[in-house]
Image: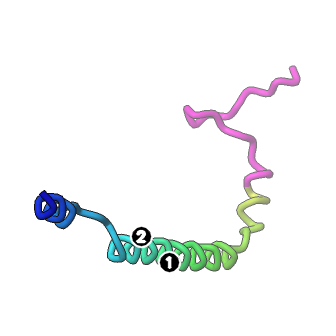
Amino acid sequence: MTVVAAASTATQIEPGALGFLIVAGMGLALFFLFRSLNKQLHKITPDTRSRKAAEAFPAEDSSGGPVPDQNH
């Protein structure tokens, strides 16, 4: 009876250390990926020329035409 119980525990699959290392490695890779992404996003400067040009022209609706003036 004891031999049967020992054999069944040996065939059980457990994630163990290899599973932990894989998950920890993926977490570490994500950490450095997000850190790099944050650095790249901080390098982007807003383009003031395009913002001023957008304010100078009236808004357009989805059909491409100008939006009617709501003041009249």
Kindly identify which residue carries mark 2: 23
The residue that appears at 75% across and 47% down in the rendered structure is 57
Depicted 59 relative to depicted 35: above or below: above
Camera-side residue: 50 or 16? 16
Residue ID at (23%, 62%) = 13
Decide: is 70 above or below 57: above
Which stretch did the figure color magenta? Answer: 54-72
Q: CA distance from mark 1 to mark 2?
A: 9 Å
Classify residue 42 by image quadrant: bottom right
Magenta: main secondary structure: loop
User: Observer-nearest residue: 14 or 9?
Assistant: 9
- Which three-letter amino acid code belongs to the residue tagged 1? Leu
Task: Tell me if label 1 and label 2 are in contact, CB under 8 Å.
Answer: no
- The N terminus, quarter of image: bottom left
Q: Residue at x 75, y 42 (%)?
A: 58
For residue 13, the mark is: none
